[in-house]
Image (spheres, rainbow, N blue to C red):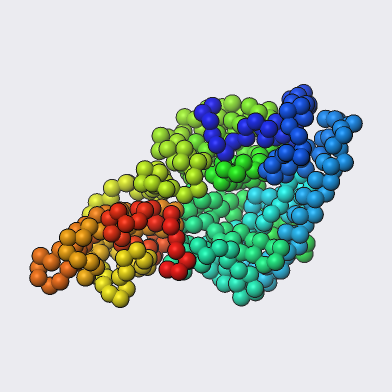
Amino acid sequence: MTEIPTLPIGPLDLLVKAALAPPPVAEAAWAEWRKGYALDETPWNEVRLLGAVAQRIGWLEPDADILPRIRGIQKFLYAQSQLCLVGAMGGLRILSEAGIPMLFIKGAGRVAVDDGIARERLVRDIDVLVPIARRDEACERLIAGGWHLRGYWQVLWRGFNSLAGHHGWSLSRGKGEIDLHHFSNNLNRLVGDDDGLWARNARVTWRGIEVHVPSATDNLLLAIMHGLRWSRDLNADWIIDGFRAMSTGAVDWALLLAEARRRRIATILHAGLSYLRQALGAPVPAETLDALKAMGTRRQWNEFHVYTRVSLPFNLQQNAAFLAMAVARSGETENPEARLQATISVGPPELQLGNWLTVDIAGVLQQGGTRLVVRLVNPAAPGTRLIGIIFILGMIFDCREAEVSDADGEGPSCSFTFVLHPRMLAGRGISRIALRITEAGSAPIIPWGNVNPEQ
């Protein structure tokens, strides 16, 4: 298998096997880890796995000299999880009392069914999916209840648009943290993508609150999606979640293939399931892997190659891989015809080179427009080369260069004609995008590489 940075290697791989693989493989992996690595030098992402290993330590190494410490680590992880769960209850009650449906995903979905899960898997936050139609209400109610968006970038981007190209917002209060999702994952962000997830859920009462939990198939899919997309810090919680989903015997492999095809995520699922089968002996049908491999595309692989290495694209080539798949998932072509265009003029005081502006494109999208012409009035001295970018968080839609001139004698101006992807933007519910104009060579083209909190 081609190296995938978000898959376990070395000591982390050994601990995963010790925690989850069949006994002969687990025993060999644990013996190798004990021989080659010292607990005092074990990094946090590996220490976290020792909670799962502790479940088996009685037969892996019953007379281990580090047994008391491993038991202590398990108790510590459980205590930390409980602090998070208790801290989140106030926010969850706010959403529950407002009648907002909550679908727990990832580790939270497992804990809602069995509180004991927190002994083998650290729960740092509660991932809650809410209906997209109530995303703003849910966020505003939490903020009114004393919860805060974590990080300036969230305040900034939510100000541009409540969807802002992201899949959720992270809010905290004290020890509690809630990841409030309006899409279940970062790659599938079209309205309707999660309809099946909602339809297949089960209702449970957890600590006096009614919540929804995913089916085993959806648990497996989401574990892989989140794990391989975001685990550059090499946490292996997703592997525990995915393995346990399969252990129920309730995974519908035909449904998983249908979701892979519909969501266009065959490549990432193939990589995750291949590891689970090869490393842990997980019961993944060979025909499922064959079907996923055949279903994958070069564009999916190009995207996969980028996001397993960087959280956001930091050059235009990386961005192109993200944009190509986002457009493909919407069913649109990369180069839509120029059917309609809208022109906006921007000048002082709104226009300040290097600052970000919000552009309302609702009217263009409603008419199926594919071009946005931005005319800059008196942006700089004639002859100045400018770069114009339209984007949302994590993705540039278009980047153009133009020269300021005074050809008509009415003062310096220049225009950018940007390409829009109306089906993708409308499908994501996005009606406003960000615009940034800079002098050529004066700043990085990728706009989120130098966010200034003062702007």
**As drawn, 360 above or below 338:** below
Q: Is residue 151 among the parts visible in the rendering? A: yes
**As drawn, 61 above or below 447:** above
User: Is 182 or 437 nearer to us in this picture?
Assistant: 437
Q: In which quarter of the image is residue 434?
A: bottom left
Count of numbered circles in the view: 0
Residue at position x 47%, y 29% in the image: 294
Residue at position x 54%, y 27% in the image: 1
The C terminus sits in image quarter? bottom left
Q: Is residue 290 shown left or right of residue 415?
A: right
User: Is 102 or 409 nearer to us in this picture?
Assistant: 409
Q: Is residue 260 shown left or right of residue 58?
A: left
Residue at position x 24%, y 54% in the image: 401
Residue 50 spot, x, y in % from top left:
76, 40
Q: Is residue 341 among the parts visible in the rendering? A: no
Residue 335 spot, x, y in % from top left:
28, 47
Residue 396 spot, x, y in % from top left:
37, 53
Residue 268 spot, x, y in % from top left:
52, 38
Residue at position x 70%, y 56% in the image: 203
